[in-house]
Image: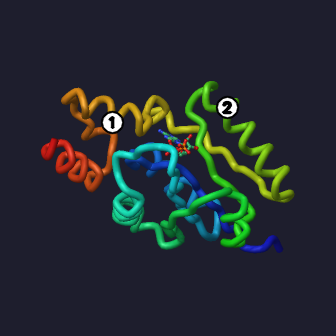
Amino acid sequence: MPAPLIAIYPGSFDPPTNGHLDLIARGSRLVSQLIVAVLENTQKQPLFSVAERIAMLKEAAGSHANVQVDSFQGLLVDYAAERQAGVILRGIRAVSDYETELQMALLNRRMRPGTETIFLMASEEYSFLSSRMVKEIITLGGDVSHFVPSIVLSRLREKFSKR
Ligand code: ADP
């Protein structure tokens, strides 16, 4: 019998969108444990701090018993080894995602043989949705209520009402 499958779903999640949540729901049905891991990227200036992103993800994905939320720095494969995860979960929205995702999956497998990346195709209704678009729309005063979970909408409104 195969060993229980621990998977990591890494990303920026700045902010988490309904597309991310859809991937978490679908991914969590395929594995024993899913660790949603927020990348602490010192090179990007994020809208939300890592702690804020973790809090939003915990609230929005809290109903899945086998989903944990964490953060990591450095190489994903090192973090995966530390968490004893053999699988990385990523989403693909369009052909444009494919090239970088393929490159990352191959690099990760080269750095840590045995690491497999599982890709889920974005659901049709979220295939156009990205954190970057959500930020652009809200910056321009548009409505993002259909694109993000309610906790994220509240945090976005708080952030933008202060500006
Ligand atoms: P990164 O900066 O690592 O790409 P993101 O938070 O933008 O971080 O995305 C994390 C992962 O979630 C990526 O694999 C991305 O393709 C996937 N993803 C993002 N938005 C969606 C969506 N709308 N539907 C499905 N997967 C998505």
Q: Position of residue 30 (x, y in %)?
A: 63, 59
Quadrant showing the C terminus: top left
Q: Residue at x 23, y 27 (%)?
A: 140
Q: Is residue 137 above or below residue 159?
A: above
Label 2 with label 1: CB-CB less than 8 Å: no
Residue at the front extreme, as displayed: 43
Which kind of residue does numbered mark 2 sit on? Tyr
Q: Which residue is mark 1?
A: 135
Can you name the residue that lies furthest to the left here?
Answer: 161
Q: Position of residue 22 (x, y in %)?
A: 47, 48
As shown in the figure, which amino acid type bears the numbered disc 1? Answer: Lys
Real-space CA distance between mark 2 and mark 1, rounded to the nearest whole angstrom: 23 Å
Please name the residue that numbered disc 2 is placed on: 98
Residue under the image location 47 percent in, 48 percent down: 20
Disc 1 residue crowd, few under 14, some 14–19, many 20+, Cα 10 Å? some
Image coords of residue 7 (percent x, y):
65, 62
Q: Is residue 99 above or below residue 71?
A: above
Instruction: Name the residue: 19% across, 30% down.
Output: 141
The quarter of the rendered structure image containing the N terminus is bottom right
Which x, y percent locates residue 113?
Answer: 86, 57
> Quadrant of the rendered structure where residue 131 is?
top left
In the image, taking residue 51 as reference, residue 138 lies left or right, namely left
Name the residue nearer the viewer: 159 or 6. 159
Residue 88: mark in rendering: none
Q: Disc 2 vs disc 1: which is toward the camera?
A: 1
Q: In the image, is residue 137 above or below residue 157? A: above
Name the residue located 40 percent from the left edge and 67 percent from the top edge: 63
| Callout 2 secondary element | helix
